[in-house]
Amino acid sequence: MPYSGGSATHSGIVYQDWYLALLMSYTFFEIDYIVYPEALKSNTTIVDDIKVKTRLGKTMYSVKFRLPSKNLHWDQSNLASQGIFSDFKKQHEADSKCTIVLVSESNCYLFSEVFTRARNAELPNDIYKVLDSQFAIEQWETAKRYLNYNDFQLIAFAKKVSIKCLPLIEIKNLIKRRFIHIGRYNEVKNLFYHKAGECSSNKTKIDKTEINRWLNEDMIDFNT
């Protein structure tokens, strides 16, 4: 969920709705792609901003527009203070097969660099070789302390956790590019954003059938 407090909350909601609109654009083109905005919490659903189910498995998205501070990158103290470490750990331990993704305009070195390298490790003995820098190793050791994990546990966690660093303007452009070859992309983009707000408020499941119904209601015909 977006952070509490005035304009920050509004910006966070706008950002999350645009990212949900982007996932809707995937739903339109992909087979068996189902999106659950503001998924209901359960024993296996802790990261609940957006849940996606496909033939390949389940992905849980935590959408955070930007850091609440002026920092440009999520450091580990931010991940801890904003509850990301805690929620991601609980999610991973509840369902070790699902993928967990942080979506934000602010990048995160731990997720984007350290964890990406760590995925090449199979055993704890491999980790210092694949990390390949003292700074990355220091970040790895710090993460172990925050999460109370050993090397083996953190390797498994790293293989399921990632970040998508996407500026808001890029999210809008990605939606546009998915529809530009069949036309009426601006109408589709705006419709998806409008429906994202509705679906988040009502916790409405989104699939291709639902999207086709919206397009028909708005008389958006790609053949005209």
Image (cartoon, rainbow, N blue to C red):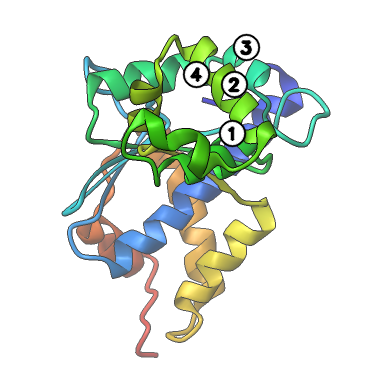
Q: Is residue 193 left or right of residue 69?
A: left
* Position of the C terminus by quadrant: bottom left
Q: Amino acid at mark 3?
A: Ser
How far is the residue under mark 4 from the one under mark 2? 6 Å
- Discs 3, 4 touching: Cβ within 8 Å: no
Kindly state the secondary structure of the residue where label 2 is placed. Answer: helix
Label 4 or label 2, whichever comes before in sequence order: 2
Identify residue for label 2.
79
Label 1 or label 3, whichever comes before in sequence order: 3
Q: Position of residue 156 (x, y in %)?
A: 33, 31
- Discs 3, 2 touching: Cβ within 8 Å: yes
Q: Quadrant of residue 153?
A: top left
Judging depth in this view, the residue of 210 and 149 nearest the camera is 149
Identify residue for label 3.
81
How far is the residue under mark 3 from the one under mark 4? 8 Å
How far is the residue under mark 1 from the one under mark 4? 11 Å
Judging depth in this view, the residue of 161 and 211 nearest the camera is 161
Q: Amino acid at mark 2?
A: Leu
Q: Quadrant of residue 58?
A: top left
From where the camera sits, is residue 51 visible?
yes
Label 1 or label 4, whichever comes before in sequence order: 4
Q: Amino acid at mark 1?
A: Leu
Q: Is residue 65 left or right of residue 101?
A: right
How far is the residue under mark 1 from the one under mark 3? 15 Å
